[in-house]
Amino acid sequence: MSIDFSGKVAIVTGAGGGLGRAHALALAERGANVVVNDMGGSVAGAATCDADAAARVVAEIEGNGGRAFAHRADVTSPGEVEDMVSQAAARWGRVDILINNAGILRDKSFAKAGLEDFRKVLDVHLMGSVHCSQAVWPYMAEQGYGRILMTTSASGIYGNFGQAGYGAAKSGVVGLMNVLAIEGERKGIRVNALAPTAATRMTEDLIDEAALEALTPESITPGALFLVSQAAPTKTILAAGAGVFAVARMRESVGVYLPEQARSAEVIAERWDEISDMSASVVTETAFGQTGRYVAIANSATLRAEVTR
């Protein structure tokens, strides 16, 4: 199967370097028209430190025969994001792909983290993804086709010391993905998440030099391309790093029904090994699906109890 993006219009945020740049270049190489978004801020989200970052990537794409334009929208500004998306639609007639990649780091232990820094990280990663996804949604819904990719992290899936704000934001985009995937299904919009481990400005001070050589952005981008392709799944988290690709899922134990007379904290403690047994775990597709499963288990247990009386 050949994955081709000819005629597709893609927006990649935070594409002035690192993963975003790799994604933008690869999309353009396969025929996509690309909006390269980057406001040129620092890793910590401070004032502009490299205003030409997006323009340089556009120059690379055009130098390779591709089509692109730069837009320095701040993803925390809904108005700037709307302008970026409307410019893409006006120039190329549609919007097919959004890769929410823009992000910042302000790492501190939770005890030392200031609320302003915590909010800023949430604003960029989570609300930035909300703003961009909401801006492209009407175009994708009208044309009956769209691909949205969130950028999550192992810090949000599993946790990491000193990254409470970052982890909360990255977990938040998974929740956003879950809901948008359900709401977009009938509209032809598929929504996924990439959990990358890469050597970028955001990680160069956190990972040793030997590992950095293997963790290139280019080793991850093939996963991003698949997740925004016509063949993409939906509601899927793809972890990637150093050429390794793996699917991450939230799973749940089968569940243990406790009749009303045994429904106490003490009984839960006594039966904890059984309740937490993941040997026969299940994947739950929706919140209502979980509710339905619980009710079915409870009804089945009640019926068995009545039959044995």
Image (cartoon, rainbow, N blue to C red):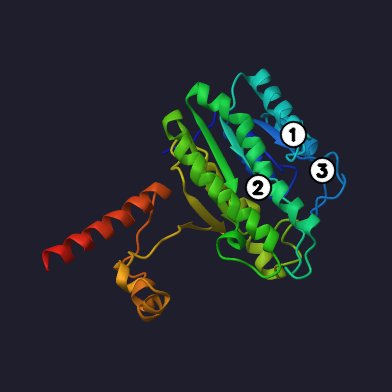
Q: Nearer the viewer, mark 3 or mark 2?
A: 2
Q: Can you say whether 219 is above or below 64 in the image? A: below
User: Can residue 147 be spotted in the picture?
Assistant: yes
Give amino acid for label 1.
Val
Left or right: residue 98 compared with residue 46? left
Picture mark count:
3
Left or right: residue 234 compared with residue 298? right
Percent across and percent down for residue 95 are: 59, 27
Do the residues under discs 1 and 2 have CB atoms within 8 angstroms? no
> What residue is shown at x 70% (from left), y 45% (from top)?
102
User: Can residue 219 be spotted in the picture?
Assistant: no
Mark pair 3, 2: CA separation: 19 Å
Do the residues under discs 1 and 3 have CB atoms within 8 angstroms? no
Percent across and percent down for residue 65 are: 67, 29
User: Secondary structure beneath disc 1?
Assistant: helix
Give amino acid for label 2.
Leu
Residue labelled with disc 3 = 40
Residue labelled with disc 1 = 58
Give amino acid for label 3.
Gly
Q: Nearer the viewer, mark 1 or mark 3?
A: 3
Residue labelled with disc 2 = 126
Task: Determine which quarter of the picture holds residue 306.
Answer: bottom left
Percent across and percent down for residue 308 are: 12, 68
Task: Determine which quarter of the picture holds residue 99.
Answer: top right
Q: Can you say whether 231 is above or below 271 in the image? A: above
Residue placed most toward the observer, 171 or 293? 293
Mark pair 1, 2: CA separation: 26 Å
